[in-house]
Image (tube, helix red, strand yellow):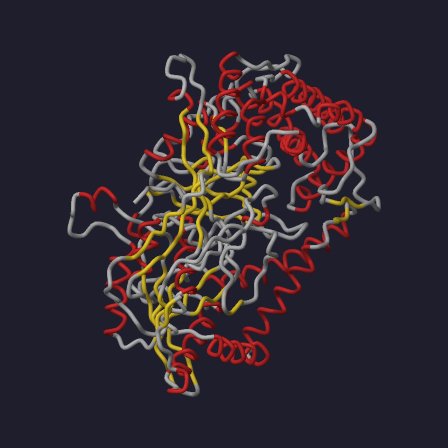
Amino acid sequence: MRKYLITLIPVVLLGWQQGPQPQSADRFPDGIEFEEGSLSEDLKPSPAQLKAEGLAIRILSNYHYRKLDLNDSLSAEIYKKYLDDIDHSKLYFLASDVAKFDKYKYSFDDFLKNDELEVPFEIYNTFRKRYQERSNYIQQLLEKPNPFDFEEEETLNTDREKASWAKSNDELDDTWRKYIKSEALDLKLTGKADTAAINTLSKRYKTRNRALERIRSEQVFQMYMNSYAESLDPHTNYLGPVSADRFKQDMSQSLEGIGAMLREEENYIKIVDVIPGGPAFRGKQLKKEDRIMGVAQGDDNDFVDIVGWFVDDAVKLIKGPKGTVVRLQVLAANALPNTPPREIRIVREKIKLEEQRAKSEIVTVDHGGKPMKIGVIDIPLFYRDFEGAQKREKEFSSTTRDTQKLMDDLRKEGVEGIVIDLRNNGGGSLTEAISLTGLFINKGPVVQVKESQGEIEVQSDTDPMVAYDGPLAVMVNRFSASASEIFAAAIQDYKRGIIVGEQTYGKGTVQTLIELNRWMPKEKDDLGEVKMTVAKFYRINGSSTQLRGVMPDLELPTAYKNDEYGEASQPSALPWDQIPSSRYELTLNISDQIVNQLRDKYNSRLKSDEDLKKLVSDLADFKKAREDKTVSLQIDKRRKERAEAEKKRTALKELDDDTDGGDEAEPTETTPAKKKKDIYLTETSRILADLVTITNEPSLAGTKKKR
């Protein structure tokens, strides 16, 4: 069986053993030292980058799964993405700059074919000049006495997605004045004096300016190459030498810290993933797409504002030795305009591998006036100790082995059905996804893999043993991805269990890493690496998991739009398609008739159950509130908006706790930890209880048949 790289590659994995550097007077906050540089000096490509460009283009053109011609049509996409990556919010370039660049719109294919880098660097150097102009304006603005009138009636539209390029510097000045005023107003409403707020902003933007001075030609080249690579699909990337080295270190070092993966995006440090087994995961304090605004060391030190920082510099503040405290100011991914960041406290520690392993609990639901025991197995990721397995160690770590033992224990406790909880499970070992499916079916295909040349490989469970043949439900959400989708899809296709929750992420592609120097062994300079999509996953019924993911049989209320998070939110995502179905034997544990009956019972509860009614109402209010991107710059109105946003944030926090299990209440010597209510899990347990009752009706008993 081939080995596939099916998990998303992070930008930075937080939590290595090196702590923050000691602070000194000639350094920036908390040990962040910036190289000297000048925005007046143009950046230029190196000879090694010209070689890397040519080699990467040949590899991607010939071996990427998506066979796209490097032509004018693709050139326009590359150009658009490059501009978007440089100035996403249209806050630096002028319309005249873009008009000048537009003449190259259909030439980027030729630049790539001919190893030309002059124009991409010219565009970026123009950005550096515009950035310096903005920086000068901001400092001049902040040096004025009383630069802002907070009684003036004006507003700011924070959504720049459809904004036009500014026609003049005066227009940009006014836009930036409003943004800086909004930030100053936020600081003022947190209790800062006007002078302190201005000083904070001045320091923030000087930090951003110094950060830009640190940009070197490697980062520009990497950005440009990724404008091409990510136009092929969002999981294909070029990693420059520094990024490639950092990735290797991230994958090999012992984890210690808060347990989160980060990236920089639009001046913010964002959470890519929360690592099972880390302190942030156990405390449920951080979620994917949350933004970290500030960092403080220990319980007493002041916060350092990290808006506009590079991710490497932010990591130096956030990571640290085991047992030390870090405090973060975090703005939730789904925060409304005017919502202030919340403060969280995390004790750094090593990632506890045992926390990554499957766990079980028993949920008792009232079903028709009678208590029914439902077993729940939470699988945070698909893990496997490959080295232990090769050595035939008796107790090597395995999702399948752990789940089988947990199911045996649950059956001894007399549960009448089992829920497999895959919410927020981002994937992991394909081998485990296949073998875990095998616990619930006789034997047969689990997933199909189609390579770029068209060859299709069917990967199957070959063990006829069925560990559990009782009522089964699988819980998924928008962040269930990759291996999770393979397992859920197989259970659904075999009609072995009911899938409950949200449409899954839709990551159905396979990547491989290629070191460019292996293709050019005599080259002395490090040319970097390419991460490239080379295959796609397909369900056994022939449908791809790519883009569409897995649609649940019963869809629970969701806070997300289908195109907001997940693969469908990526413009260059590979399309959904189909291949021929495999031959497999249906279990017929689930039929359309059963699903319809379950849906009727669920819809009835939606109208009568107070928790579900409140959930639907709160989500509707939340979605409506998120559509308004305009904020007031008048202090009294802004204060009122913040109060409303805070009220909604409190309701949303309770909603989050009720839909993902929430934090556990702090235990005391006399009171054990008490888990908060999880509405989604409760409802899934009710659905499974309905399934138990329905399938006990003789008229619905099914027989196996082949496809």
Is 138 left or right of 425, judged from the image as shown?
right
Q: Position of residue 59 (x, y in %)?
A: 47, 27
Closest to the observer, 327 or 212? 212
Q: Position of residue 197 (x, y in %)?
A: 67, 36
Name the residue: 77% across, 34% down.
177
Task: Tell me if residue 130 comes above or below residue 588 in the rendering.
Answer: above
Task: Tell me if residue 414 comes above or below residue 657 in the rendering.
Answer: below
Name the residue: 77% across, 38% down.
178
Q: Would residue 101 be visible to someone looking at this image?
A: yes
Closest to the observer, 447 or 176? 447
Task: Tell me if residue 348 comes above or below residue 129 in the rendering.
Answer: below
Image quadrant in which the C terminus is located: bottom left
Is 572 left or right of 94, judged from the image as shown?
left
Q: Quadrant of residue 71?
A: top right
Task: Tell me if residue 129 comes above or below residue 574 in the rendering.
Answer: above
Q: Quadrant of residue 497?
A: bottom left
Q: Position of residue 613 (x, y in %)?
A: 59, 74
Q: Would residue 260 be visible to someone looking at this image?
A: no
